[in-house]
Image (cartoon, grey):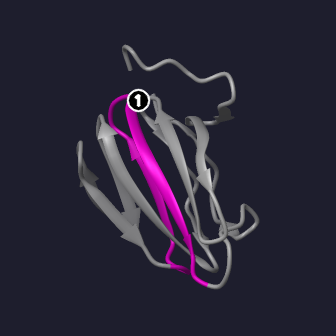
Amino acid sequence: MRGVDKPASATDKAWGWTIEMLADTRRRIMKCFAVDGGYCSTHRHKNQANIFIVEKGQLRVFIENEGVWLYPNDSISVPPLVRHSFQALAETLFLEVYIGVHGSPKLTDIERFSESGVKR
């Protein structure tokens, strides 16, 4: 995306990068950038809800294999234990919010069913 610089503290992902914006005992907010065609693994979180908020670009969020298109200022929430993934349909900047249902959201609270990558 033109004009979006990758922060030095960003964590590389197969589909782009993330940077933690906020983390406390109930929530984590990540700023994310996905390259055109970038997709995350199909996965679920055991004890946390996941919210996607698109700032720029287009993101297709799959919830239990049904795709929902998100455009700037759109958002969607995924409850705990629900399989989901996403794919960027253009270079996309978005927020990913994790809300702990039973305590703080943890990086280990994930069960993956596929890999991440980029579809060209």
User: Disc 1 designates what residue?
Assistant: 36
Q: Please, what is the dominant secondary structure of the magenta stretch?
A: strand
Range covered by the magenta-colored residues: 80-101
Q: Quadrant of residue 2?
A: top left
**Between residues 46 and 9, which one lies in front from this camera angle?**
9
Task: Tell me, yes or no, whether the highlighted magenta stretch contains residue 95.
Answer: yes
**In percent of the image, x 64 and y 79: which residue is there?**
46
Q: Residue 42, located in which quarter of the rendered image?
A: bottom right
Query: Observer-nearest residue: 60 or 99?
Result: 99
Q: Residue at x 76, y 65 (%)?
A: 108
Mark 1 residue type: Asp
On the image, the x and y values in percent for residue 24 come to 65, 63
Vertical placement of residue 26 versus 92, above or below: below
- Quadrant in the picture for the N terminus: top left
| Residue drawn at 44 percent across, 48 percent down | 95
Check disc 1 and report its element: helix, strand or loop.
loop
Asked if 56 appears above or below 102 in the picture, the reply is above
9 to 73, vertically: above or below: above
* Residue 85 can be seen in this image: yes
Residue drawn 65% across and 69% down? Answer: 105
Residue 89 lies within the magenta run: yes
User: Residue 8 location in percent, x, y?
Assistant: 67, 22
Q: Position of residue 110 (x, y in %)?
A: 68, 67
Front one among 3 and 40? 3
Q: Is residue 117 left or right of residue 12?
A: left
Which percent across, then down, holds residue 64? 42, 73
The correct choice, above or below, for 4 with respect to 9 in the image is above
